[in-house]
Image: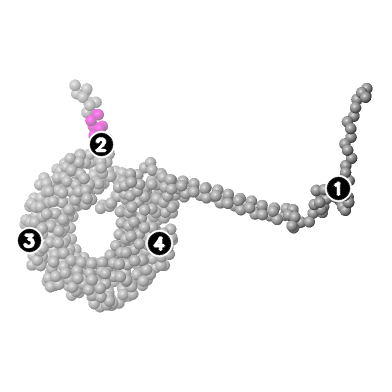
Amino acid sequence: MTFRMFPLFYLVALMTSSYADKCPQPCECDHDLTFVYCYGGGLNTTHFYRIIQLLPSNVIELHIQAPEDKPNHFKWNDNLNRLTKLERISFINCNIPAISQRVRIKSLKSLNLQHNYIDSLQMDSFNGLPNLEHLDLSYNHISVVPSGSFIYLRSLKSLSLSHNYIKELPSNLFYGPQRLQQLQFDGLKISVDQLNPLLDNLPYLERLEINHCNLGDSAISGVWLHKVPKLSRLGIGGNNLTVIPSHKLRELPHLQTVDLSNNKIRKIPPCSFCSCNITTIFLGHNLLGIDENSLTIESFADVNVEKLELSFNFFDNFNSKLLWKAKHSIRSLDLSGNTLTRPRKTLIQDLPNLSSLHLASNHMEELPNTWPIEYSSLAFLNLSSNHIKVIPSTFVDSLPFLKILDISQNEIRYIDDHIIDFLTETTERVYMYRNPWDCRCAHGGVQKYLKHRKQILPFSEPVTCETPFELKGIPVRKVSKINECNLIFGGSYQLSQMSELGILLSAVIGLATLISGFMFVAMAIRRRKYRLKKPNYNHSEVRSPFPMDTITSPLKTRFKDEEIPDLPPPLQPLTTFGHV
């Protein structure tokens, strides 16, 4: 009996092996099936269970993430515990209501559960994750964090509780993860009196994010930043600040990045960042473009700022001369969200080392055929969220060193083949989503690039077709059996086969009409010349060598002045011999 059952067991094992060697639908995987990405959305608990069942045991990373308009809805599944090599989990926008109390994945180092419906934490929620280093619980519904919630996470380096409903935090919250390096409390309605005792227990903290906490100028001045001297990044945006807290920034000798965005700052006085080691400054969504003297050439004096963000500041025009004191250090400039209409020379002419430029969300409709020479050194260019319709053919020559290009969310329907060749061979990444792509030519243009440079990116939207109607919403990369262009020149000029055949037919008819016209004109000219050479016999113009009366009556020539004699009578008919 056992021998007879062996083939059945073998068949089951073979089928299981074959399933394990396939990437579970509707996910995408790398060649070794160690990295799994499920970004389509619309998954429920049953779908999630099937995916977990089909995953091979050697999976290292599992990322399930849904777009905003198509969220997932499933619960945590304890079958994840069998994936003993799993190191990274991302379940984003999946409506997970709670974390299982029986989770046991000792190999896990990163857990990202942002944008879910988790409403509470327990003391033993993470006791089965002893090696966890990164935990993201942002954008959930957590209102209470019990004491000792993270006591088992002694290896924890990064924690985000941003954008929850937490109003109180216990002072002993970080007795377990004492070597925490990154802490994000964005959007929490906590007071400085609750925050300061926590900072007193985090001597190794390198990043602190307290954006959008409604703290104000005076509250920020009271934060115990001197308790975290190793801080290299500070986020204090969205706190209704009206001035640069220069004195607090100078308390942090290792500070490299400061986020002052989404405030009400109208002016940057001279030497606002002096004696600081700051290299990255975020000043977006302020009011710097309203007043004429909001920036001066001394505003960024004595600071080696490399990345400067000035987006959404109401700049109608911007002159890089205002950055004179930092012109040699600036590598990246963000001017997105203003009202700039063209990539003018004045935007970057005084920044010789600039390599990255953001011009997204401006009022640009056309790109220049000839770009200013200052743009030729750019390696990164962001033109997203404008109204651009055409990429000029000279684009390749104007930006020879370009590596990353963002043209998403524009009105582009087609990109010429030689530009696609440049993007494929030279660039590292091109963002193209949310454009009305014309998919009538499936094997060329954008599809050619997407198939050659296939990438799986988080939060990336598929590049979808807009036309023809039957392909609307279909990812360009998956379109096949469509080839309505490129008979002769349609692929370069965005023409369908019908349009191109119509043009060719019109050209043939036009050519035939033109030839017929030429022939008609030639014949008309020839007839005219023939008429000019032919003798004219008009009596009034040409004298005949013979008088008309001679021609009509030759007898009158002989008897001109005499009467014409009568003719003799006719001869009698001959008679036959023998008759009388």
Is residue 228 in view from this perspective?
Answer: yes
Residue bearing mark 2: 19
Q: Nearer the viewer, mark 4 or mark 2?
A: 4
Residue 257: x and y in percent read 23, 66
Earlier in the chain: of badge 1 and badge 4, it is: 4
Quadrant hosting residue 567: top right
At a point 43% along the width and 60% down the height, the residue shown is 394
At a point 34% along the width and 70% down the height, the residue shown is 347
For label 3, the crowd category at 10 Å Cα-Cα, with few meaning under 14, some 14 to 19 and many 20 or more, is some
> Distance between the Cα atoms at labels 2 and 3?
48 Å
Residue 356, compared with residue 502, is above or below; it is below
Residue 265: x and y in percent read 21, 72
Q: Nearer the viewer, mark 1 or mark 4?
A: 1
Residue bearing mark 4: 399
Earlier in the chain: of badge 4 and badge 2, it is: 2
Q: Are marks 2 and 3 in contact (CB under 8 Å)?
A: no
Q: Nearer the viewer, mark 2 or mark 3?
A: 3
> Distance between the Cα atoms at labels 1 and 2?
126 Å
> Distance between the Cα atoms at labels 1 and 4?
104 Å
Residue bearing mark 3: 168
Earlier in the chain: of badge 1 and badge 2, it is: 2
Count of numbered circles in the view? 4
Residue 259, compared with residue 510, is above or below; it is below
Which residue appears farthest toward the front when viewing the image? 580
The disc labelled 2 sits on which kind of residue? Tyr
Q: Nearer the viewer, mark 3 or mark 4?
A: 4
Q: Is residue 74 left or right of residue 498?
A: left
The prevailing secondary structure element of the residues shown in magenta is helix
Quarter of the image with the C terminus in it: top right
Residue bearing mark 1: 555
Q: Are marks 1 and 2 in contact (CB under 8 Å)?
A: no
At a point 16% along the width and 42% down the height, the residue shown is 45
